[in-house]
Amino acid sequence: MVTEILSVLRPAPTGVYIDATIGEGGHAEAILDASAPSGVVIGLDRDPEILALARELLAPFGPRLRLHAGDYRELLSAWPERGIDRVDGVLIDLGLSSYHLEQPERGFSFRSEGPLDMRFDRSRGQTAAELISRLPETALTQLLQEQGEERWARRIARAIVTQRRLGPIATTRQLAGLIERAVPPPARRGRIHPATRTFQALRIAVNHELDGLDDALEQALQRLAPGGTLCVLAYHSLEDRVIKQRFRAWAAEGRAQLVTKRPLRPSPEEAAENPRARSAKLRAVRQSGTNRPGTLS
């Protein structure tokens, strides 16, 4: 949704922008191009491996790009840029990078065999395999229901607990096969793979993706100059609900203006070309007040 992001973010040649989940750098590249010749992008990501890819891709932009290892939920408490007071735009893309899905050793995809890891930062935290090895059946059911919106959560949780008594569930395809066998036959023939929602729930839990999202949005708004824009891309209803409620509350309080009264969706052409984008929803607000650019050291 690069075109849609640029249309609401409105990059300007003197602007300073935060790509708070820079990933491989595709959105940042578009913002840097649109804000030439002197616009600046501050890129954050908590995955050091993918940050290295962004650094390589965006090297031609030189000092107009400033990359930092960090979590978007720490925009105020661990702000890395001295000399910058406010910024003109913040983009938060809550989606999973293609890089993560295409690297079997990261364990995000059930379509290729790999260790059941799913951590964005592999230097810390528990893996998905460790998570499902210890959660009681009731807690596992609740996790799949709440963070995966999985209809067959009880069946899947029971199958996981039964299997782990026999031996560890250590790989992506091992878990995916278990899920396929656990759900009723009609559920195996649906439009999406029966393991999709379970993998989503585990990824969210492993990386604590919903923890602090509401607070992160508040921090992003506080970083904006008056008239600055906050854009957020969400890919499932759990995230989108938090974003929608927060943005509407700000509008009611007069703190921000809704740029998108309804979420923008990918064009039919983009959805056909990139099926992973089909569920994307883009919402944006503009901070109330007169616009002024961020101050740059």
Image (spheres, grey):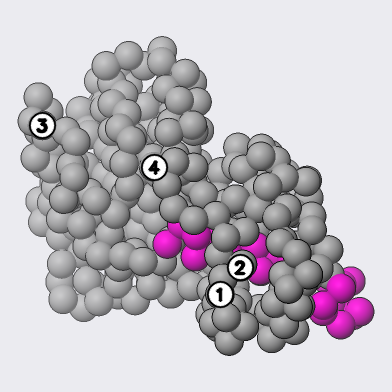
| Percent position of residue 220, x then y | 23, 54
Q: How many marks?
A: 4
Residue occupying image coordinates x 66% and y 69%: 197
Q: Which residue is mark 4?
A: 46
Left or right, 186 with respect to 91, comes to right
Amino acid carrying mark 1 in the image: Leu
Q: Is residue 229 above or below residue 205?
A: above
Of the two numbered discs 1 and 4 on the same chain, state the one appearing first in sequence: 4
Range covered by the magenta-colored residues:
181-208
Left or right, 91 with respect to 279, comes to left
Amino acid carrying mark 3 in the image: Arg
* Dominant SS in magenta: helix
Front tag of 3 and 1: 1
- Near mark 4 (Cα within 10 A), the count class, few <14, some 14-19 or many ≥20, is some
Disc sitting over residue 135 in the figure? 1
Does residue 239 belong to the magenta stretch? no
Q: CA distance from mark 2 to mark 4?
A: 23 Å
Amino acid carrying mark 4 in the image: Arg
Q: Which residue is mark 2?
A: 132
